[in-house]
Image: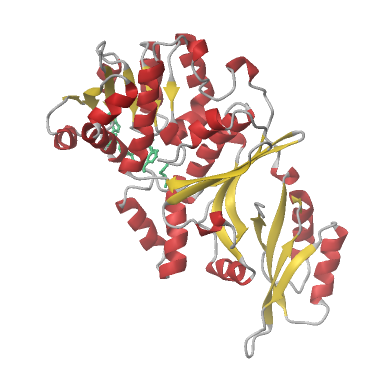
Amino acid sequence: MKSLNVGLLGIGTVGGGTFNVLTRNAALISRRAGRPIRIVQVADKNLALAREVTGGKVELTDDAFALVANPAIDVVVELIGGYGVAKELVLAAINNGKHVVTANKALLAVHGNEIFAAARARGVIVAFEAAVAGGIPIIKALREGLTANRIQWIAGIINGTTNFILSEMRDKGISFDVALKEAQLLGYAEADPTFDIEGIDAAHKITILSALAFGIPMQFNRAHVEGISKLEAADIKYAEQLGYRIKLLGIAKWRVGGVELRVHPTLIPARRLIANVEGAMNAILVQADAVGSTMYYGKGAGAEPTASAVIADLVDVARLHTASPEHRVPSLAFQPDAVKDTSVMPMADIESGYYLRLRVEDKRGVLADITRILADQQISIDAMIQREPGEGESQTDIIMLTHVTQEKFVDAAITKIEALSVVTQKVVRLRMEELG
Ligand code: NDP
Ligand code: HSE
């Protein structure tokens, strides 16, 4: 049987993992794919690294554009990253009639609409299982396993680096900077780690999941993005006292009139399974009408877990590339002409519970003023703690959890609360999801 010939762009963390797993499990993979899957050429700027990883067994080049034009190659695996040269290479590969496998969530979230349209026009496959949650087959689950369902919401820990940092800080008491360095050494972090820390990477991934779940275009530029860099240790501690854990969640919700698409630190009840996902592990909860709630858990980053997803895509290509495009599973789960332009809601209209931390003068009547403002905005309080002021302290913290309300009401209440003379600092506001 003729082999499926692969050209590998980038042999760094994921590229190296892909080469190693494909080599180690070649015979097994070939039995599943129905034909051998063979890397015939590797392009990397660093030829010495490429030689070291491949042991000189494969043709090497430092000219990525030559690889995407190589007539011997059936599938191009893009593992360079970013949306600069990677976009040019992917479009060139498609234009040359090659199937593409990529782990590049940034590229797909920002330029996916253009890339999938180009692939459709050329009749080639663009597969991207590794782009969301590393080794977890969440793309296949949404695209195939849950196809009978109306998906209501998705909430996921989909950035390993930030989950690793939050876990290390909580369990080992190490600093943010030390935890980030560790994540970089372990190969979890993006080339620019601000993508991880500021929630951009998670926003890329939840954008892709929202397109698959709801049959909408990629709308990354409309996603709300907040990372963990401004999260304070005090809030992690107060959340624990109230029975909650704080996780960086990517959330996509179907609502009448639009879709919520947001990434931010979120309080989750500590008893939920997903609240106990630690380290670089990822987990995605999907709520759907027929099956109910399902959760997908596993390694969201790292060389071989991600390679596992890349190779699963290669096996799909090996099985399907001879089928006519209309007989393949649609790239984004919905038939391309059935995608609906439902738009992302403004944050003011989202619905959530809220955690509020207020720094106040320890005076009589303060609490009454605050609760009156909340009541005026129809916000009801679910739980509250007031820290006892220390000896000689004239100020204290009040922490409140609200029932679900619209963000615009909370914003209006915060503006009024901050205008009170007894409130001495900006109110800390975090969102809270029960995920029940
Ligand atoms: P790395 O930086 O480890 O690897 C990228 C490789 O591509 C490097 O060897 C780099 O060389 C090379 N490269 C850069 N530009 C070019 C070019 N123009 N031509 C040829 N080679 C080039 O990245 P990762 O393996 O970590 O990530 C790859 C992709 O996978 C990214 O899209 C990332 O977001 C995604 N991903 C990563 C995961 C992970 O756990 N690391 C998990 C899931 C997805 P040089 O170093 O010299 O620049
Ligand atoms: N930087 C990403 C993370 C890699 O930490 O999750 C996996 O996509």
Q: x%, y% of residue 272?
A: 59, 57
| Vertical position of residue 339 compared to residue 430: above or below | above
- Report the residue at 48% width, 29% height from top: 108
- Report the residue at 44% width, 68% height from top: 171
Q: Quadrant of residue 389?
A: bottom right
- Report the residue at 53% width, 28% height from top: 144
Residue at the outermost bottom position: 391
Camera-side residue of 267 and 313:
313
Q: x%, y% of residue 81?
A: 37, 34
Q: x%, y% of residue 29?
A: 29, 28
Residue at the outermost front position: 31
| Vertical position of residue 384 compared to residue 49: above or below | below
Camera-side residue of 139 and 424:
139
Q: Quadrant of ligand 2?
A: top left
So how many labels did they put on this image?
0
| Vertical position of residue 390 compared to residue 294: above or below | below
Q: Quadrant of residue 402?
A: bottom right
Q: Tell me if 420 is positioned left or right of 244 in this view.
A: right
| Vertical position of residue 272 compared to residue 282: above or below | below
Q: What colour scheme governs how the chains and residues are painted in the rendered image of this protein?
A: secondary structure
Residue 284 shows in this picture: yes
- Report the residue at 60% width, 39% height from top: 223
Q: x%, y% of residue 428?
A: 65, 63
Residue at the outermost left position: 56
Q: Quadrant of the N terminus?
A: top left
Residue 44 shows in this picture: no
